[in-house]
Amino acid sequence: MTDLSATLPEVLAQHVAQWPDPAASVVVVEPGAPLASTGDLEAPRRWASVTKLLSALTVLVLVHDGEADLDEALPADAAPPGATLSHLLDHTSGLDFEAGGPGTWRVRAQPGQRRIYSNTGIEVAAAHASALTGAPFAELLRELVAQPLGMTSTRLDGSAAHGLVAPTADLALFAGELLAPRVLPVAVVDALRTPSRPGLVGVLPGFGKQAHNDWGLGAEVRADKDPHWTSPENDPATFGHFGQSGTSLWVDRARSLALVTASAEPFGEWATTAWPALATAVLHRAR
């Protein structure tokens, strides 16, 4: 149980001390600045699927600048028939989780019909962005998202779906921007977090089938999912992502708070209870 007399940094440390990786790092963010933290915030971390948030924003900046079209069907040699960037970003392209490549796509549904979480979908969206601009996607992510936000130690190492390497401090900067945009266009962040094709049934990896498996164009939206990796007390519009590397990031604008966690312990049963418990404690203590 959390010590009711503890300060917020002490609350964070108390929770992390019970995790499989007691050297994990956590940051609570409020508009404009971090509010409290524990752990080493400067050590490089692998963020796994939290990467998708930055990759999706990179594509959405290109859309905002008129260099890409969300709703135009992609070339037949670049994506399954009828799939658009919006289908790829909100996991409704029909592509399987790891879906092969052109000519060998593993497609489980027609675009727009089902929410099927897909690494390949994000990778296809990134490849299309590179084809449109002539620049490597890692360079686009750095120039359009990381550098403007001051994330100087952030890099994409490999897949646009899961290759991000960055210190926790950089992800706290990123979470602060999602909470209250100051650098990126508001419309870009809104596209990331606003439910796209809401109400579709689907499986949330690690948490099972959800009646309303809502996503924005890149971010998972809490909605009424149960079970879930955030707190039951988080606002339904809370958005973010977690990664199999033991990382997570959520943004609750109704409470003016964001939470970033990083661990060397991969996602597992421990996280399904530890993350919601920490989120609940943060919501209570930061009131």
Image: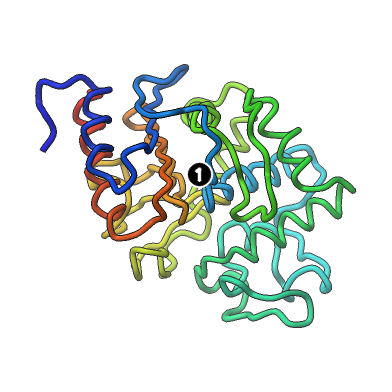
Nearest the viewer among 271 and 252 is 271
The quadrant in which the C terminus is found is: top left
Q: Residue furthest top?
A: 32
Q: Residue sitting at 22 percent across and 28 percent down?
A: 11
Quadrant of residue 88 within the rendered picture: bottom right
Toward the viewer: 162 or 226?
A: 162
Q: Relative to 175, say whether 107 is above or below.
A: below
**Residue 35: where, in percent of width, then height?**
36, 19
Q: Residue furthest right?
A: 134
Task: Name the residue that disc number 1 marks.
Answer: 193
Residue 1 relative to residue 198: left or right: left
> Of helix, strand and loop, which one carries label 1?
helix
Q: Position of residue 44 (x, y in %)?
A: 55, 36
The crowding category of the residue bearing disc 1, from other C-alpha atoms within 10 Å (few below 14, some 14 to 19, many at least 20), is: many
Left or right of 130 on screen, residue 256: left
Residue beneath the point at 72% across and 62% down:
124
Residue 5 position, x and y percent, is: 10, 20
Q: Amino acid at mark 1?
A: Arg
User: Residue at 64% across / 64% down in the picture?
Assistant: 121
Residue depicted at 70% across the width and 79% down the height: 105
State the image coordinates of residue 158 (x, y, percent, origin top left): 70, 53
Placement of the N terminus among the 4 image quadrants: top left
